Image (spheres, grey):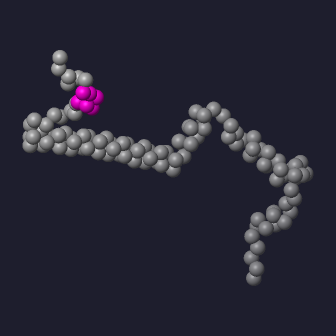
Amino acid sequence: MSSRDPLDDLLDRWHPPAHLVPDLRAEIRREIARATPSHRGSWLTRLDRAFAQPSFAITFVAACVLLGLFLAEARVSRLHAAYGAQIARSYVQLIDPLLDAQPTAPAATTNPAAKATP
C-alpha cells in the first residue's frame, strides 16, 4: 500500500560531491561580503542609497512639507503681528492726532542748558 515516489530512489543514492569546500558556511559568508557593497563611500553614494529606500524618501518629503508649512505659518504670524501693531498705531493717531508717533530723545528734553536763554 505504500506508494513510493520515483525521486525517493534518486535521493537515496545522492551523495554530496567531493569538490565542495569543507567549510561551506564560511565560504558563503565571504561571497556575500564580497558581493555586498561596502558601507563606506562618498556621501553622495550613501545619500543615493538612502533615497533608494521608499520609506526614507517618503519620510524626507513629509518632513520637508511640514517644515515648509511651519515656516509659512511663522511668516504669516509675523506679518499679522506687524499689521496689528500698525492698526494700533493708526488708532492711537486717530484718537490723539497731537501724539507724536516717535518719542523725542530723552537727552534733548531733560538738558537744562539747552533751554537757557541769553
Residue 53, position in %: x, y? 54, 46
Q: Report which quarter residue 88 is drawn in.
A: top left
Q: Residue at x 63, y 32 (%)?
A: 42
Which span is picked out in magenta? 106-112
Q: Report which quarter residue 84 is drawn in.
A: top left
Q: Residue at x 33, y 44 (%)?
A: 74
Tell me if 35 is positioned left or right of 56 in this view. Answer: right
Q: Seen from this angle, which residue lies furthest top?
A: 118
* Residue 36 visible to the viewer: yes
**Is residue 110 shown in magenta?**
yes
> 14 above or below 110?
below
> 80 above or below 9?
above
Residue 48, position in %: x, y? 56, 37
Q: Seen from this angle, which residue lies furthest front?
A: 118
Residue 99, position in %: x, y? 13, 37
* Residue 54 visible to the viewer: no
> 102 above or below 3?
above
Q: Seen from this angle, which residue lies furthest bottom?
A: 1
The image quadrant where one finds the C terminus is: top left
The image quadrant where one finds the N terminus is: bottom right
